[in-house]
Image (tube, rainbow, N blue to C red):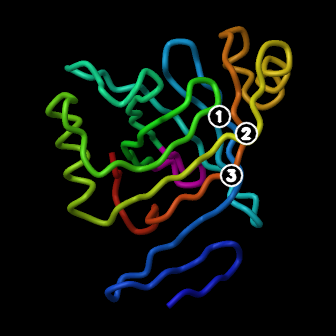
Amino acid sequence: MEEEKGGVRAVESMDVKVKEMKGIASIALLPCGSISGHFIHLPDSICYGLHGTELSCERECSRGEDYRLIKLTIIDYKSGKEQDVVVECKGHDAARFQNIDHAHGWDNDVVGMVDKDNGKRKVSVSFECETLKADAVAEDHIKQFMPKLAGFDAVVNVGPMSISGLSFEGEGDMN
């Protein structure tokens, strides 16, 4: 059963309600492999912070040179709480993110984090770049929306994002 209210779709399966938020994300891809940006949940225009660090693979990755895992931290500015999720990132400058089911070949702590996520309420993230900004256009965007990242030679991805299973209400620090 699905019901939608205020841009949040609640999906019931096996007696568990999972909120799905849809909106637009603006994400700076930094040359070091980190990401930083914002997710604007529509239609309420609630802003969440996004910060990600690339996870190193202990073996050669056979999924292609544009494949990497990112530890993505979603920040609720209102409560100050954070929640981490491991996502796969495909594409070089025009990135696509989605959840993964396993992380074989990565360090044990990464595999453990993914397995732990699969054992509890799962946060799912999906993002696809629709607009790629580089050079002066990216720098102008960064100066306007992410001024602390100015001068880092980042490219900017803007596109639709959906996040489900995220809940900062009534829980302690979720890191």
Residue type beneath disc 2: Val
Query: In this figure, which residue is indicated by the disc labeled 3?
Result: 160
Q: Is 66 displayed left or right of 55 in the figure?
A: right
Residue at 49% in and 64% down? 164
**Of label 2 and label 1, which has the lower sequence position?**
1
Residue at 38% in and 84% down? 13
Q: Residues within 10 Å of mark 3 (few under 14, many from 20)?
A: some
Is 50 included in the stretch rendered in magenta? no
Q: Is 140 displayed left or right of 170 in the figure?
A: right
Residue type beneath disc 3: Pro
Q: Which image quarter holds the C terminus? A: top left
Q: CA distance from mark 2 to mark 3?
A: 7 Å
Q: Which residues are magenta?
A: 74-81
Q: Which mark is residue 158?
A: 2
Q: Which mark is residue 107?
A: none
Determine whether the residue tagged by mark 1 lies in a helix, strand or loop.
strand
Q: Residues within 10 Å of mark 1 (few under 14, many from 20)?
A: many
Horizontal and vertical percent position of residue 52: 47, 32
Residue at 83% in and 27% down? 144
Query: In this figure, which residue is indicated by the disc labeled 1?
Result: 27
Q: Residues within 10 Å of mark 2 (few under 14, many from 20)?
A: many
Residue 126 against residue 156 in the figure, above or below: below
Residue 22 against residue 129 in the figure, above or below: below
Determine whether the residue tagged by mark 2 lies in a helix, strand or loop.
strand
Determine whether the residue tagged by mark 3 lies in a helix, strand or loop.
strand
Residue 47 against residue 12 in the figure, above or below: above
Residue at 66% in and 17% down? 154
